[in-house]
Amino acid sequence: MNKAKLLYTIDAFDHADAVEIAEVLELNYSSVAMGLLRLVRQGLATRYIDPDTQLLVYEITPKGEARIDYFLEGEFDDE
């Protein structure tokens, strides 16, 4: 699992819990949870407890959005 794919997935959901993200990426929960923790520690995502579901959910931070833009620019530089 790479950082870009994880960021894109969180961004597509707007906010999502680790189980949802793991299901979409077809990866095991523990790998996704560790990747999400790394994103939070790097300031690319934030997490909080959703008051409705009582689950820990993740959202992209402005720094994470800038990283997504950076990844997207790199994909199209050769055109």
Image (cartoon, helix red, strand yellow):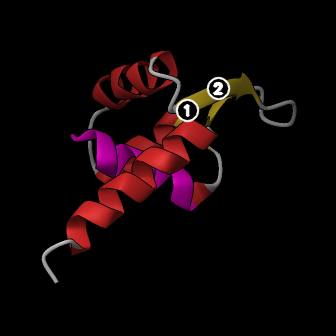
Give the amino acid at mark 2: Arg
Tell me the quarter of the picture where residue 22 sits.
top left
Q: Position of residue 52 (x, y in %)?
A: 86, 36
Point 39% across, 20% down: residue: 38
Q: Quadrant of the C terminus?
A: bottom left
How many numbered marks does the figure carry? 2
Q: Residues within 10 Å of mark 1 (few under 14, many from 20)?
A: many
- Label the magenta part by its dominant secondary structure: helix
Point 58% across, 56% down: residue: 13
Q: Are marks 2 and 1 in contact (CB under 8 Å)?
A: yes
In the image, 38 versus 19, the foreground residue is 38
In the image, 6 versus 28, the foreground residue is 6
Checking the image for residue 47, the label placed there is: 2
Checking the image for residue 45, the label placed there is: 1
Point 48% across, 37% down: residue: 19
Q: Residue furthest left?
A: 78
Q: Is residue 38 above or below residue 59?
A: above
**For residue 2: magenta?**
yes
Tag 1, which secondary structure?
strand
Give the amino acid at mark 1: Ala
Q: Which stretch is magenta?
A: 1-12
Q: Residue furthest top?
A: 41
Point 42% across, 53% down: residue: 68
Tag 2, which secondary structure?
strand
